[in-house]
Image (cartoon, rainbow, N blue to C red):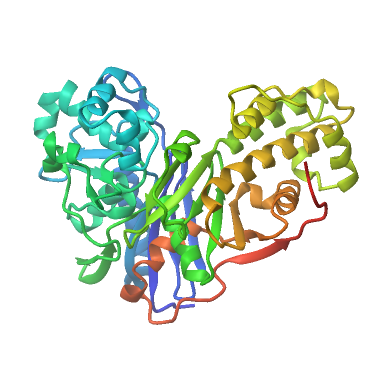
Amino acid sequence: MDPSSLILIFDIGKTNKKYIVLDESYTIILEKSAQLAETVDEDGFPCENIDALTQWLAFSFEEVISEFDKNIKAVNCSAYGASLVHVNSSLNPVAPLYNYVKPYPAMLSNELFAAYGGEKKFSLDTSSPSLGSLNAGLQLYRLKKFNPVVYEKVKYSLHLPQFISSRFTGEAYSELTSIGCHTALWDFNRNNYHKWVTDTGIIEKLAPIIPSEKCFSKTHNEHLIHAGVGLHDSSAALITYLHSFTDPFLLISTGTWCISLNPFNNQPLTDEELNQDCLCYLTDKGKAVKASRLFAGKWHEEQVIKMASHFHLKTGYFSEIRFKPETLEQAIELDQIIDVEGKTPLQNQMLKLSSFDLNLYSSAELAYHGFMYQLVKLQAASSNLVLEKTSIKNIYVDGGFSKNDLYMQLLANMFPSKSIYAASVAQASAFGAALVIHRKWNKKPIPENLVTLHQYKAKISNLP
């Protein structure tokens, strides 16, 4: 086979680094992954080894070019957000890529909040809860305040996807999906950078914004390659769904965090939604995407380990459990009643989950049905926060829980008036990064079958 046009996509997660080669039909021709050892910053806190990542990118690029030569027409990337690479005028890093879970000095964030109407107003304006270092813009603010010598060396602070892009373009730019992922940089009311960004002068360290579909034509070994500007990974995955479906939908992207993304909810973020961990992202077109977050994947992982120990089973046992109506009914009868005064229904449900008592259940299957019932009730409540006031009928579940029969069937039972689908797409983030520059490398129309769907229908009505 001698494909005429291929694209190379780098998909960079915190744990796994991958590259994927796609042909014009979006068939995966080659996929390789690597895990790179972390390093530490000046405080000894673990962080991405940006030098190792840069070397891996260069090596992988040459590896792909040597195999496919002039068939590679374009390169782009998707990467995790909330991460800034501080570079000099030569676009080389001058500081560590600080970890977004690194504790943030409360004194510093409180100082910023106080100057702009308090934490609540600041969070509403930037459409993100106060998340410390996960608000990536605050990482740059800390560098300015605590390490001015290094700050002065910084020409630009690039979001990670745009830093990766710069390795191939030699250019420094910013891009909306990266700016819009809870960075605290963007004022969603003004549709521009927040006033604090200009007032503090850090805007001088932010590269000019260009469209997500922008490409740079670069010559490599006398061969022209179109290089994209890079995308935030969750937003890239959403692009795949927006290209695949015309009817409005909610996407529940499941993993460690389960994020409900509603690109069809254009209502401003409310104080109540903010208090329940809702936020907004930006699409590649600059539109706000209302989202809610739930730590469901992590809770599930921890509980499965506890159940396996309690019932003397291997953790893999639970992935084989299928939905059984009679087992669910037994589990519901054992469901704890918790109603703490002053707590919201969502908060009360979270208390039930945290106090889940395995001793109430006579079997692992019964316990798992009981736990998943509580977990999916939480998921439904979380998703409803961004579903309300919209006419969406279709809900797509992507990621790990889309393969969990019990999760999917419970979700269908919780939303009997909606169509619930387990969605399967080989590499949603990589596909999105390829789709956004489709015209630059692909002569064929975008395939209609990028996403495979399996529908689940309600089997028990009126769940309590």
**Residue 382: image location, x then y, percent:** 57, 42
Tell me where residue 421 sits by quadrant. bottom right
Identify the residue at image location x=73%, y=57%.
Answer: 416
Q: Is residue 298 left or right of residue 5?
A: right
User: What number of labels is visible?
Assistant: 0
Tell me where residue 154 sits by quadrant. top left
For the question of whether residue 51 can be seen, the reply is no
Residue located farthest toward the front when viewing the structure as drawn:
341
Q: In this view, does 273 lie to the left or right of 174?
A: right
Q: In this view, does 9 lie to the left or right of 191?
A: right
Identify the residue at image location x=84%, y=23%.
Answer: 360
For the question of whether residue 213 can be seen, the reply is yes
Q: Nearer the viewer, residue 390 or 222?
A: 390
Instruction: Specify the quadrant that holds the C terminus.
Output: top right
Identify the residue at image location x=70%, y=22%.
Answer: 355
Q: Which of 32 and 235 is in front in this view?
A: 235
Q: Which of 456 and 278 is in front in this view?
A: 278
**Residue 377: image location, x then y, percent:** 68, 41
**Residue 22: image location, x then y, percent:** 45, 67
**Residue 401: image location, x then y, percent:** 65, 47
Judge whether 92 appears above or below 251 on screen.
Answer: above
Q: Which of 10 and 188 is in front in this view?
A: 188
